[in-house]
Amino acid sequence: MSIPLIPVMPAAKSTLEDIEIQLLLEGIYQYYGFDFRDYALASLKRRVRRIMQSEEVSTISALQDRILHDANCLERFLIGLTVHVTAMFRDPSFFVTFRRRVVPLLRTYPFIRIWHAGCSTGQEVYSMAILLHEEGLYHRCRIYATDMNDYVLQQAKSGIYSLRLMQEYTHLYLRAGGTRSFSEYYTAAYENAIFRSFLKENVVFSQHNLATDNSFNEFNVILCRNVLIYFNSTLQKRVHQLFYDSLCSFGILGLGRQETLKLTPFEQHYEELDRDNRLYRRLH
């Protein structure tokens, strides 16, 4: 007696992909400790497919086999999976508002601790260092710039960016309320712009994984812009708890344009300093 074949429907193919992704992420977590299990699935799938193309494998299971047996493949996977779209003074109105609404509050502190979580390649860290320098506050600040990916952290620590980006960054700097010539902050060398060393004198670059690591200090300001959009609701809740536990009373939280505290369990614990630029102040 022959067994009738079950037609392969699109939904079944999608389910197999979901299963393979779950196994891939669980394997990476169990073997290497990197936890992507609560990342938003739709964007995660897109990036895994791109990595499959670059690795020239036809299935996620084949990708999993390669990652688990080749640490170099894991490094390429981490670079491909994490998103590093950033720029200096990105969303200029955020920095204008930060100068107007947050800087006066920071002036009341004798020493200021700032956590830049998910700092990627560091452009926003140097942007904040420049802003604080121009406001006369940088000398009493410590900025903790963290990311889970050591490769991008090393780029951030170098403070070296392509010279061809400087025209765009100068434009953003001026729109962000910059008060000087932007070229004062870097030296041109061949095709690179090397940012002045004093801008990283008060910056500590370090690895930190928002999905698994805990609070490591108490901060006056936490900035985490355009990172939470890649997490599902479970991981977003964990990170919001981490930020709440890490902020001092009346500390400032800055999120990305598409991120909000609205309808989260933490909404009632903050006042909104600026709705459009997603700046919040912890109430107590």
Image: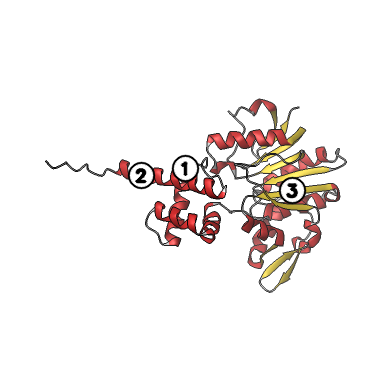
Marks 1/2: CA–CA distance: 14 Å
Q: Is residue 148 above or below residue 237?
A: below
Of callouts 3 and 2, the N-terminal one: 2
What amino acid type is highlighted by mark number 2?
A: Leu
Relative to 44, 178 lies left or right: right
What x and y, as percent, mark residue 183?
A: 75, 64
SS for dot 3: strand
Say which residue label 2 marks.
Answer: 16
Front label number (3 vs 2): 2
SS for dot 1: helix
SS for dot 2: helix
Asked where in the image residue 262 lies, by quadrant, the reply is top right
Asked if residue 273 shows in the view, the reply is no
Relative to 52, 31 lies left or right: right
Say which residue label 1 marks.
Answer: 41
Say which residue label 3 marks.
Answer: 144
Give the crowd class for mark 1: few <14, some 14-19, many >=20 residues within 10 Å. Answer: some
What x and y, as percent, mark residue 93?
A: 68, 45
Labels 1 & 3 near each other (Cβ < 8 A) = no
What x and y, as percent, mark residue 59?
A: 38, 54
Give the crowd class for mark 3: few <14, some 14-19, many >=20 residues within 10 Å. Answer: many
